[in-house]
Structure formats: structure tokens, C-alpha cells
Image (tube, helix red, strand yellow):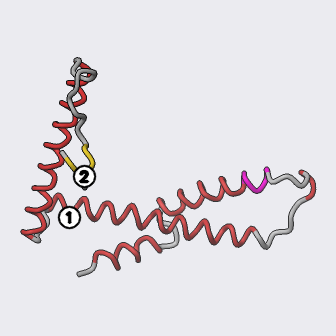
Amino acid sequence: MQVEGSLLMPQMNPTNTTQAGSRVISKEAKFENELALAQKRLDRAAKSGVMTDEQLAQRNKDIRDASIQLEAIMLKMLYNEMWKTVPKDKLFGDDNTMEIWRDMYNEELTKQMAQNGGVGLADLIFQQLTQK
């Protein structure tokens, strides 16, 4: 197989005709077949223009997950900006250990918030992306 002039399958020569070389070639051929089948499925789906119920459900699940992740990112940004207004505590010294801990805490807190309903931003994003 060639892609823009570079060979993907190793060339047979006296040094790689061993069993290991045969396995590599077999894996390459299997991958090439799977790639061709995937391309055919994509071509059929593009031509039909219609999604099956399973494809639609998977797409909606992916959009929902992405919406939740986006809400978590937005909430984390909000929390980080809010923490900037809090005066620094000199009790623990000037190292950034507390900032690292707070950043990790905020990240986990906002992930959990978004997964459990958050402020409703994920729902709005999902609705906007799935409307017809």
C-alpha cells in the first residue's frame, strides 16, 4: 500500500522474510482491509444521508458528553477567576503547593457539578446542537 509515495507495508527482503516479518505483513494487510471496509461504510452513510436510530443515539450521546465537558471547563474558568479575588494566605509560605491543590480540587469539583446537572449550560448547549 502506498500513501503519497511512502510505503506502508514493509518490502520483502532476505532480512525480514522470517516469521516476524510475515506477521508484520499480515497485520498490515488486515489493517488495510479494515480501513477499506470502514471507508465503504462511510461512503454508504454519506450517500444515504440518513442516520439509523443507533447512529442517532450514539451521536446524541457524544454531543451530551461534549456538552457536559464544556460546562465543566466553563465552570472551572469561573472558579479560577473567583479564587483570584481571595487574598493569598502567608501561613503556608510562598510556594505554589496550595495553588496546585486548589486547581486540582476545582477541576474535580466542576466535573462533578457538570455531570450532576451543573448550572444548566450543558442542557442549553445540547439543545442548540441537536435542534433541526
Label 1 crowding class (10 Å Cα cut-off): few <14, some 14-19, many 20+?
A: few
The residue at 25%/29% (across/down) is 24
Q: Position of residue 47 (x, y in %)?
A: 8, 69
Q: In whole angstroms, how far apart are the C-alphas of marks 1 and 2?
A: 38 Å
The secondary structure that most of the magenta stretch takes on is: helix
- Displayed quadrant of residue 74: bottom right
Q: Which segment is the magenta one?
A: 97-101
- Disc 2 residue type (three-letter): Gly
Instruction: Give the quarter of the figure containing the N terminus.
Output: top left
Instruction: Give the quarter of the figure containing the C terminus.
Output: bottom left
Query: In the figure, is residue 9 to the left or right of 114?
Result: left
| Element type where label 1 sits in the image | helix
Q: Is 1 inside the magenta-drawn segment?
A: no
The residue at 40%/72% (across/down) is 123
Residue pointed to by mark 1: 56
Q: Position of residue 129 (x, y in %)?
A: 33, 76
Q: Is 98 inside the magenta-drawn segment?
A: yes
Q: Residue furthest front?
A: 14
In front: label 1 or label 2: 2
118 or 45: nearer the eye?
45
Label 2 crowding class (10 Å Cα cut-off): few <14, some 14-19, many 20+?
A: few
Determine whether label 1 and label 2 are within 8 Å by CB.
no
The residue at 60%/57% (across/down) is 107
Residue pointed to by mark 2: 5
Query: In the figure, is residue 57 to the left or right of 124?
Result: left
Query: In the figure, is residue 98 to the left or right of 27?
Result: right
- Disc 1 residue type (three-letter): Leu
Q: Position of residue 9 (x, y in %)?
A: 23, 38
The residue at 25%/35% (across/down) is 10
Q: Position of residue 101 (x, y in %)?
A: 72, 51
| Element type where label 2 sits in the image | loop
